[in-house]
Amino acid sequence: MTSTLLHAVPIALGDRSYSIAIGTHLLDQTDTFASLPKGSSALIVSNTTVASLYAQRLHDVLAQKYERVHLVTLPDGEGFKTWQTLNQIFDVLLEQGCDRKTILFALGGGVVGDMTGFAAASYMRGVPFVQVPTTLLAQVDSSVGGKTGINHPLGKNMVGAFYQPLLVVCDLDTLKTLPPRELSAGLAEVIKYGPIADLEFLDWIEANLDQLLARDVQALAHAVQRSCEIKAWVVGQDERESGLRAILNFGHTFGHAMEAGLGYGEWLHGEAVGCGMVMAAELSYRLGLVDQSFVQRLKNLIRKAGLPTVGPVLDNQDNAGRYLALMRVDKKAEGGEIRFVVIDGPARAAVRTAPDALVREVIDACCIP
Ligand code: NAD
Ligand code: MG
């Protein structure tokens, strides 16, 4: 089968620059990996679900370039994004005598990507790594931007490092096996890029949503390309998250409250972000920044993407109070002050605070079916 490289998105970060290859059958082609430095060994890091689908193919291709190709198969799930699982990667690296030139390949979704990146950042104080994201969320979000890490029992993503890959390979064929819920969750992050940065892209998503849901390769290629370009553009101006990067959290403040309030794992992150964007749009409207038709437009799109648009009730007595309490302890809050990403013009996002009374109105309005 011949591979087709549909897009290559360059990420300009000086001597840490790299490229995101987007196409079909990329996993099976030695050409895909031609730019990588030579070394004697490679380690594929994957999980039980993804390894059984794709590890052999990647292994066969890498075996043409590297003398020794190892595989470590981690348990599947956010609950395993831990120190203990991370250690399994170090165990294999050390047992196999892997040196500083060993290249790590993260084959999987965001969980595998974040853990592999962190392992690469810290093994022998840094070895090269390649992202081979296999979820839509990982292709459009987690594999771009250089954040890597693991969870701690006291908080998500609390231990990690900024570390850039040598290459990102988005093989769109891998998305064919993704469960529908995971596809929709990834679409939430794709939709996010429209209102914060590119209204033409929002128009395009609306016009091509059916094709995206049907996993049409051309449509997916454009969605992944444009998403990566926008994320790279934002991150390029604010690699270490001191300001602008916060706009990527559109929908996330409300969404994190839903995830925490329901118990992690009940709703997928993308589902909470989808619903959270409806609330953030409603807040923007009530702050007088956008009109009602914008809120309705976004809500329709999110619903059609297979995502929830009605907020979950987190407390039968004081639902809005529960949301507010959860948002005040969110990582992105400052001194208990909740910071909302709002839309304040066409394709323009801003970070704002808002009076509790107004936020309560938003939550009440968005939690009614
Ligand atoms: P995930 O990695 O848990 O993958 C979701 C599920 O899909 C898993 O069960 C996985 O095994 C399965 N899967 C993956 N690829 C598949 C395929 N091709 N076919 C069938 N099944 C497949 O979740 P995710 O949504 O990809 O990533 C979420 C993680 O990403 C979170 O830990 C989050 O913190 C992290 N994240 C990181 C960043 C960042 O900037 N580093 C950004 C966003 C999210
Ligand atoms: Mg997110």
Image (cartoon, rainbow, N blue to C red):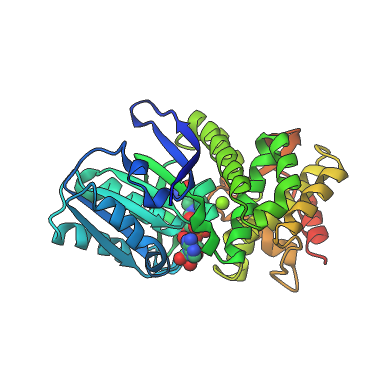
Outermost residue toward the top?
14
How far from the left and from the top, in percent, is residue 130?
35, 46
**Relative to 183, residue 240 above or below:** above
Q: On screen, 24 above or below 16? A: below
Can residue 351 be spotted in the picture? no
Looking at the rendered structure, the number of numbered marks drawn on it comes to: 0
Which is nearer the eye, 5 or 162?
A: 5
Q: Position of residue 197 (x, y in %)?
A: 66, 35
Most foreground residue, 130 or 195: 130
Above or below, 13 relative to 210: above
The answer to whether one can see residue 363 in this image is yes
Q: Position of residue 52 (x, y in %)?
A: 38, 68
The residue depicted at 75 percent of the width and 45 percent of the height is 207
Front in this rendered view, residue 107 or 13: 107
Quarter holding the C terminus is bottom right
Residue drawn at 58 percent across, 48 percent down = 333
236 horizontally vs 190: left or right? left
Q: Is residue 197 left or right of residue 54?
A: right
Looking at this view, is 319 or 236 the one in front?
A: 236
- For residue 47, side relative to residue 331 (left or right): left
